[in-house]
Amino acid sequence: MNQYLVKALNDYTKHNANFTGLLDWHLCHGFVLCRPECFAIGFFTNSSEPMQPAERHHADALFVTYCAGEMPFVLEQFDGEFDFVVFQRQFKNNSSVRVWDYQKTLNRIK
């Protein structure tokens, strides 16, 4: 099994979260990226309403719900498609929603 998927399972289990339900939701409404480089789940949204999913072709932002492994690899998969990247740090007890410039974020983490 992918080492980053195992990390996700462990992280969500440790926080008593329903990983299967979250994974199911992202399979239906967002994206799931499971590669040797990473495991990531997220959805397409708009920077004006970042917690509200949007159809990919109407979105200006990529909400990264969870990422383990190489974050630059994840963002490169959608490079040029979105203006913003959105995320929260709930596992670090900080639920504030961050909306960052996509290209600046990608350049910063490379």
Image: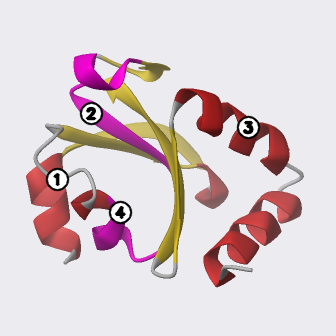
Q: Residue at x 68, y 70 (%)?
A: 5
Label 4 SS? helix
Magenta span contains residue 73: yes
* Rendered position, 48 above or below 63: above
Q: Quadrant of residue 23?
A: top right
* Rendered position, 15 above or below 62: below
- Rounded to the nearest angstrom, the CA distance separating label 2 from label 3 is 21 Å
- Tell me the residue that label 2 is attached to: 61
Q: Residue at x 39, y 18 (%)?
A: 54
- What is the crowding at mark 3: few (fewer than 14 residues within 10 Å), some, or many (at least 20)? few
- The stretch of residues the image draws in magenta is 54-74
Answer left or right for 38 relative to 70.
Answer: right
Residues under numbered marks 4 and 3 in contact, where contact means CB atoms less than 8 Å apart: no
What amino acid type is highlighted by mark number 1? Asp
**Residue 79's disc number:** 1
Of marks 1 and 3, which one's residue comes earlier in the chain?
Answer: 3
**Residue 107's disc number:** none
Of marks 4 and 3, which one's residue comes earlier in the chain?
Answer: 3
